[in-house]
Amino acid sequence: MSVVPGIMVGMTQSTVDALHTLAREYLPQEIAERWIGLLRPGLRLEKAEGAGSVVGRLGGLPGLPEGEEWPVWEGHGPLAFVASLDCAALPSGALDIAMPTDGTLVFFYFDGQLDDGCAVVDPGEPDSWAGARVLYIPAGVPVAERTAPEGIQPYPEVPLTARAETTAPHLWHPVVYREFAPMPDDHPVWDEDFQEALGDHFGGTEHRIGGHAHPVQGEVETEVAHGALGNPPWNDPRIKEEALRWVLLAQFDSDNDADMMWGDCGALYWLIRPEDLAERRFDRAMFTWQCC
C-alpha cells in the first residue's frame, strides 16, 4: 500500500468497499489495485439524531480552560467558534493517523462577521495565519463555557456523530502522481467516466476527520505546502514533496443546520504534519479554505 510518510499502516479495508468496486469497474486491473492502495480511512461527521453517539458539535459556545484567552487575530478581532471534538468519543482507531484518544479539539476561524469578509485567511500570507486556530485541551483540565466576544454571533449548536468511511485522493493529489508517474493525458485515472463515478459516490464535500481531504477546488495539501515553503514559484518541485508531508486533521463544510456558509458553499480545512500530530503540536497545524 502507498501511504503518506509518517502515517500508521495496518488498517483492514473490506474488499467489498464501494470504492474498490468502482475502481475495478472503471480501471484496468493493475491500475485499479494500485489506486485502491491510495485509499485512506476517514471519519464522516454528521448531525447526531436519535440514539447516535455524540462526538462533538458545530457552533454553540466553547468550553475553555481558565487563563486561556479567546483566540484573536491581532489588528482584526476575535475569531468565531466553529466546532469542538471529544477525542475520547471519536472512533479514532479506525484512522491511520495518531489522533488523540482523549481531550478536546476546539476550532476557531475569523469568519468575516467583524469586517464583512474583507480580511482573508490564506496559507500564502503568514500574517493571516492567526485568523484560524485549533486548540487542544488535555483530558482532566477544567473548562468553563465562554461568552462570545462583542461582535461575534455564535453559530447555532449542532451535535455531531461519526462513522468510518473510505476516502480517495483528489485527482491531482501529489500521491496520485507519485504512484502513477509519468501520467499522460489519457491515463485511466483521469478518465471522465471514472471521475464522474467518483463524484457521484461522494456527492460533495462533508465534515470529515482524517483521511484524504475532499477539496472544493484544487488539492488543499498543495496550497498548504506552498505557504509552508514561503510561497516559491508554483512549478517548484519542492511543493509536491512538501504536500506529501501534510495530512487532513479536519474539514468543516458549509452547514445549513449550523447556519454556516463559507463563501459560496465552501469548506474549511485544517492540515497537520503527522509528526506534529503525534506530539500534539496543534499550534503547527495550517489552515486553508475553498469555495465554489
Image: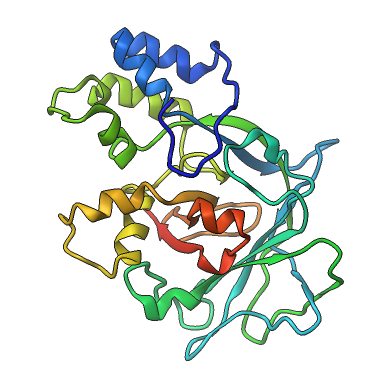
Q: Is residue 142 left or right of residue 248?
A: right
* Quarter in which the N terminus is drawn: top left
Residue that appears at 54% across and 11% down: 15
| Whether residue 208 is situated above or below residue 79 in the rendered picture | above
Residue ranking furthest to the bottom: 75
The number of numbered badges drawn on the structure is: 0
Along the line of sight, the residue nearer the viewer: 95 or 5: 5
Q: Position of residue 7 (x, y in %)?
A: 51, 41
In front here: 44 or 263?
44
Give the residue drawn at x 66%, y 65%: 155
How is the structure coloured here? rainbow
Residue nearer the viewer, 198 or 282: 282
Q: Quadrant of residue 192?
A: top left
Q: Residue at x 63, y 60 (%)?
A: 280
Which residue is at 23% across, 22% downward?
191
* Residue 118 visible from this viewpoint: no
Residue 190, relative to residue 233: is it above or below? above
Q: Position of residue 119 (x, y in %)?
A: 40, 79
Quick check: 47 left or right of 15? right
- Indicate the position of residue 67 as horizontal and vertical percent values: 76, 85
The part of the image, by quadrant, that contains residue 95 is top right
Q: Is residue 154 left or right of residue 3?
A: right
Above or below for 214 versus 139: above
Can residue 28 be seen in the rendering of this structure?
Answer: yes
Residue 179 rendering spot, x and y as whole percentages: 29, 29
